Amino acid sequence: MAQKKKTRIGAWIIVGVVLVGLAGFGTGGLTGNVRTLGTVGDKDVTVASYQRALNEQIRALSAQFGTQISFQQAQAFGIDRQALSQVVLTRTLDNEATQMGLSAGDMAVFERISAIQAFQGAGGFNRDTYRLVLQQSSQTESEFEAEIREDLARTLLQAAIVAGVPGSAAPADALVRYVAEARDVTLLRVAADMLTAPVPGATDEDIAAFYDANGNQFLLPEAREITYAWMTPSMILDQMEVTDLAIETLYQDRIAEFVQPERRLVERLIYADPANAQAAADRLATNEATYDALVDERGLSLADVDMGDLGRDDLPTETADAVFAATPGDVVGPFPTALGAALFRVNAVLNAQETTLEEASDGLRAELAAEAARSVINEDFDRITDLLAGGASLEDLADRTDLVLDTISWTPAVTDGIAAYDSFRAAAQVATEGAFPELEVLSDGGVFALRLDSVTPARVPPLEDIREDVAAAWQLQAQQDAILARAEEIAAGWDAETDLAALGITPRVETGLTRRSFVEGAPEGFNQTLFDLALGEARVVDAGTSALIVRLDNVTEADPTATDQAAQRAAISDSIAAGIAQDLFDAYAVSVQENTRVTINQATVDAVNAQLQ
């Protein structure tokens, strides 16, 4: 939490926001005449600033989901409201800075602008590039420089508020002691083969009692009884006619896939000066250096010089002759390239490969048939949709089209047949009784429509239907109870003279365990149990089908001043201080907002949003 707050403090410095805005929605505004959404104190809230904030929020959300989010989707997440709140808060702080007389000088503004990458030319900051970029984003120099000046003033205001936040040594020390405290333990695992007597079988009374007490173990999930009609390319594959000419044409179109000439895996090390390239080649010839060492000397990695697999046509004739005459590991050259003289290392030989038309024919035939089947289904899509719209039932579809009728008792655990498709499972999950079927698409190009006939609620089957399962579960529980009892017995008598080998137990010692350590084979909650133990105490832990006896042998207290703990202590202290600073700033911002008059024209905001939809 504190770390997140620390990040938020930096977010108030909006140079990054300005840069994103330059490539964003632009500042053309709503109609070219409306430029503001309202006012905050004496400051205008511009349409452009709202659009930039909105663009940045959508970009962040898209990155989070790994796909481009539409404006409508962003609105569903409340992104438009967040962007407006961000802009209003920023202008509130701008207004407060102005009221306090805070400002930034021309030199500070220039230094900030000249450091922005978008305005750089070959020799650094370029005035013409600066003007062009602003022109493309529909901003004037005076508007942009005013934003930078306000940004700098706002940063001064923020720095003044959060400056002097006291250090957090005491809580940091306490957290380090808690997190870094280490423990040494001895573990004994007790299994079923260590029981001294067999576990008796369950009686009818035992089974009935276990069923009554543990019925939820046998709970059947809600089942949705569904009738569906579907058709996939594989269902009609045999009906598709594929000519030999079509197969040969496809083969020729993809000839590079089936006929591959001999190739080489090659690396290329380039030198701007041919003399340096020759000197490097001479060092290789006399074994004064290796190719890898030459790459390192250039400050490069092998990934930087890797060219991948190349054919003869990918290299000039002279270079290709040398490369293809070389054996794996050989270095040839130097040879001239467009970038300079280069040494080439051959890493592997990829022999020529050829798949004949006859060998490829079956696969190509199946591919063409599948494509034809998808086309047939696609051509029938509108007709089937029209039938459903006209009131046709799924049974009617099966009679009048190539769709196949079937039923399924679907639960989330059912993934066979049509339930293997994500789109079917999604539709089955939300289907309601009485709803009209709709034609939907499967991932392989097939189609389906479904009808929910009934829902069987989650339920526990009658005992007589699952008696064997209940008896087996009782037996497992009885065995585990016996294992735990045996473990308690061993733990109670465990001392230095206990002959563990005679009990069939091999002790396992774990040292330096912290609260964040992972212990292989330990059950959930093991670390909590470990740190609840007193020195020398042994405790039995249920491990599911076995038991662990845990004895605490040693406690190593953490030393926050130790060298190996210093970095962790500093990070915790900084995180706490950042959290306090953010809380102070948030409290200040809220106070300023409460005392600043905010006027926002919601109709203008709605119009801007409508333009973006």
Image (spheres, grey):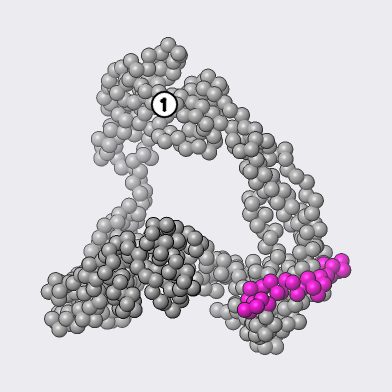
Q: Quadrant of residue 439?
A: bottom left
Left or right of 571 on screen, residue 299: left
Which of 345/520 is in front?
Answer: 345
- Image quadrant where one finds the C terminus: bottom right
316 falls in the magenta region: no
Q: Determine the residue located farthest toward the top in the rendered image.
A: 497
Q: Position of residue 4 (x, y in %)?
A: 63, 54
Q: Residue 229: in sight, yes or no?
A: no
Q: Position of residue 58 (x, y in %)?
A: 57, 70
Question: Which residue is depicted at the point 37% across and 23% down?
Answer: 506
Considering the numbered disc 1 on the image, is that residue within a helix, a strand or a loop? strand
Q: Position of residue 590 (x, y in %)?
A: 76, 60
Left or right of 120 on screen, residue 224: left
Question: Which residue is depicted at the point 44% across and 58% down?
Answer: 293
- Residues rendered magenta in the picture: 96-125
111 falls in the magenta region: yes
Question: Which residue is depicted at the point 62% across and 42% down?
Answer: 568
Q: Amino acid at mark 1?
A: Arg
Which of 1/184 is in front?
Answer: 184
Provide the residue designation for mark 1.
508
Q: Quadrant of residue 586?
A: bottom right
Crowd rating for badge 1 (residues with CA inside 10 Å; few <14, some 14–19, many 20+): few
